[in-house]
Image (cartoon, rainbow, N blue to C red):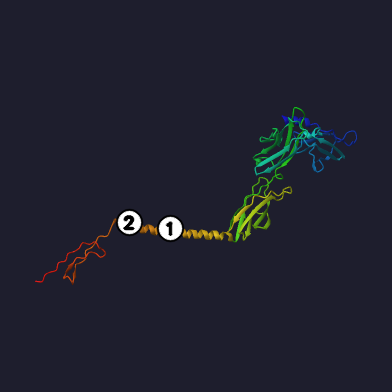
Amino acid sequence: MDVLRLLMLLTPACLPQEAAQGPKPPIQNVRMDPERGRLTWELNARASKILCTKDPDQQQWAQDTYCSYQTLSLCNVTKYTVQVHSPPFSTWILFPERDEQPETAPADLSCWVHDVDFMSCRWAVGRAAPSDTQYRLYWKDRSRYRECGHYQTDSGGRHVGCRFPGISQYPRIFVVMVNGTSQLSSISCRDYLADLYEMEKLSPPSITAKCNKSSSFMEWKMFSHFNKYFQYQLQVHKSPGTSITENISTNFFQLANPGNYMVKMRVRSDGNVHSEWSPWGAPQRFRCDSDEERPARILRTSLLVAAGTLAVALLGLLLCKRFSLMRRLFPPIPRVREPVCDPVLGGELLVLEAGREDCPVVEVQALEET
């Protein structure tokens, strides 16, 4: 309702200043139809080649009795001129009419696309806006305005920002308007022509690398719903005080003899004259088999060798203990050897297996001579 009421108030335009061409000019009653986005007039005579000019630089040829505008500002005073080639005639109007309280309007309205899928708009409270002023943001979808659903507020609870998710579903160009209400005064509006392609603020992508001692192959993926071509700037630091900067348009880069290095990146749109470099991304570090890793590698190898030796020693000790236990559980059975003759005693001795000192004493009796 606020928007419709605003359209009704803005429909009247300043009376045209016409160059008199006889009693009846070829066209008259020039006016703006804000709901249809048309600059219209009435024809009093046959006229050819009617040209419409918006401000000084936007021109189009008329279609019979009107010129159409896809984007129409309801807040910024704009001059529209209609020129007839034959017979020569020119007239103009201002739409909307001049604002009587421009300082009640929101100030510094700006919008930008960020993080691939979002658009944010911010504004400040007008210097002459009463304390009870509340602002609302609308965006125009074809012929109607839709209100923002995600406001940000200041400490006084006034709307000073809005966030749009799922921006890929929006048309590329549309009008954003912020108007306001107050019990103490009428509030002027402010609008903004949003071109999502031009207003996108890109974020540097994350880099991945596959590397060895001789080279490092870096690559990344860039995401955007509106920009397709990009320029990248890489800053590579190999050692303190040594750095190189590379400007490329591909999504990969190969670095020779990388060693241990740090890299950071920034990006901008390639082909968009309004695009600026993004902030530098967070530095990323990569280690590619440099000399600084050799001591650590040698230490790891030594530890592995020591661990292997210790394991073998423990296994041997375990086997020895197991063999000793088996001998205790199952001692060997003694064997009786063949009797031997003692030449001194002239008899026989029964000798047990060697190594046993606890054998029983065998009595030896000499044979008497018969």
Q: Is mark 2 on a helix, strand or loop?
A: helix
Q: Dot 2, crowdedness within 10 Å: few (<14), some or many (≥20)? A: few
Residue type pointed to by label 1: Ala
x and y percent of residue 74 in the render?
Answer: 77, 35
Q: Name the residue under label 2.
A: 325
Q: Quadrant of the C terminus?
A: bottom left
x and y percent of residue 274 in the render?
Answer: 74, 47
Residue at screen point 68% across, 43% down: 113
Q: Is mark 1 on a helix, strand or loop?
A: helix
Q: Which residue lies furthest to the top in this view?
A: 183
The image quarter in which residue 5 lies: top right
Q: Viewer-proximal residue, 314 or 340?
A: 340
Query: Marks 2 and 1: which is nearer the front?
Result: 2
Q: Residue furthest left?
A: 370
The image quarter in which residue 186 lies: top right
Q: Name the residue under label 1.
A: 311
- Quick one: label 2 or label 1, which is nearer the N terminus? 1
Q: Viewer-proximal residue, 126 or 254?
A: 126
Residue type pointed to by label 2: Leu
x and y percent of residue 324 in the render?
Answer: 33, 58
Asked if marks 2 and 1 touch (Cβ < 8 Å), the reply is no
Q: Viewer-proximal residue, 129 or 347?
A: 347
x and y percent of residue 103 in the render?
Answer: 79, 35
Q: In which quarter of the image is the N terminus?
A: top right
Q: Dot 1, crowdedness within 10 Å: few (<14), some or many (≥20)? A: few
